[in-house]
Amino acid sequence: MRSTHEPDVVIVGAGAAGSVYAAVLAEAGKSVLVLETGPARKLTDLYSSQIWARRLKWCPPHVEEGDSIGVNFNTGHGFGGAAVHHYAVWPRFHEDDMRMASKWGRGLDWPYDYRVLRPFYDQVQREVGVSGDAELEVWRPPGDPYPLPPVLVSNHGTVLHDGFAKQGLRTAPIQWPCCRERTTVVPRASGTGGVMLGVRSAPWPTRWSSICLELSKRAL
Amino acid sequence: MSAYEKVSTARREFVRNSSLLIVCQIAGEILHISPAEAAQRSAPMRFFTDAEANALALLADSMVPGAAAAGVVHFVDSQLAGDPAESLLIARYFNVRPPYGDFYRGGLAALDAAARAKHRTSFSALRPAQALEMAASLFKGPPPGWKGPPAAVFYQCVRNDAVDVVYGTPAGFEALGVPYMQHILPPRAW
């Protein structure tokens, strides 16, 4: 596609971060050009099949660090990025996670601490909509309460909770990016099912669709 | 036709039309048939040798009874013969480095060598009980002298391939009495 139009913003990568940036900027009236090297996706590619959903997964080249541990495990790729097909569990880093080198002698320290990152965690959970129970998460670092109430705990979650409780350990509902306040059922046929029903946040259905809607309004 | 019969017929149609189809060439004719039919008609392999195919059939069937008849070998073979970016194999999910054929070929060769070291015969010539014992041992760790991909990952991939073919389809869900709850059916209606 050839265009002489000069956009206000160019974003490299149509993934979880780039999609949200693009949507926010477009909704604010900016013209945005998004560059994505992976395959294009359609909403109808999100099949209700755990087997066919594997086509959304990363394909070569591998990205490896250190002891040949691949870092592409279970990530999506292409339009929608890693989050095009994801488990959607979004815990925050702990404060100590950002000081691994100085505290534990492993990995690297972040160039700043959790206090700098916290407002962005709060902003993202407001923007995307994350459910959970901050009070039950006694291990959670400081932050705003979740904007959405926790999803109902499944039967196997209850079994795990009871087992942990017998050992004197605690559990909490997962931190789940979701789009509806009363999410009670997640289809079991596929991880994409929750996305397609609009109960699980993913960049393509929840952010790109808003961009497309905005563009179609302008075309009218 | 009663309402019940309509629902029942629709469900049978759904199940009948929702098996995976693979591409096979039999007697010069290109056919789209199910892995089970490909196995039944002994469709030629596109990637595996006959010896590898026999070993994989025995290994998968020892892990998930019925996998060989369900066409697990033809399913894996058809995936390995195609583009890795289009692959439906669980190996992709488990972070196996493509081409995935190297992974299967290496695992089957190592398994055959282990069988010859322990039983003085090829893996595919083992009795079912011996094959089951060797398959189970893979999960616990590599047999002595194992020179192949990580034994436990190989075990997990082949076992999952077998589960995919036997239970992963809407027909398999139906057999288990689990509602499939589809929203977007995949192409060729897996």
Image (tube, rainbow, N blue to C red):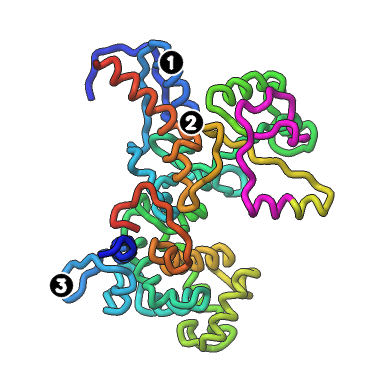
The residue under label 3 is which amino acid type?
Answer: Gly
Instruction: Residue lying at the far left in this picture: please name it.
Output: B28
| The disc label shown at residue B28, or none | 3
Residue underneath mark 2: A16
What stretch of residues is rendered in magenta? A132-161
- Amino acid identity at mark 2: Ala
Say what secondary structure mark 3 lies in.
Answer: loop
Mark 1 highlights which residue?
Answer: A25
- Neighbor class of circle 1 (other Cα within 10 Å; few <14, some 14-19, many 20+) is some
Out of A156 and A65, give the one closest to the viewer.
A156
**Do the residues bearing badges 1 and 2 touch, measured as CB atoms within 8 Å?**
no
The chain letter for the residue carrying disc 3 is B
Mark 3 Cα-neighbour bin, 10 Å: few <14, some 14–19, many ≥20: few
Q: Is residue A159 magenta?
A: yes
Marks 1/3 same chain: no
**Which is more toward the observer, A157 or A64?**
A157
Q: Is residue A16 above or below residue A168?
A: above
Q: Amino acid at mark 1?
A: Leu
Residue at the spot x=38%, y=35% of the render? Answer: A79
For label 1, the SS is helix
| In the depicted structure, whether residue A70 falls above or below residue B5 | above
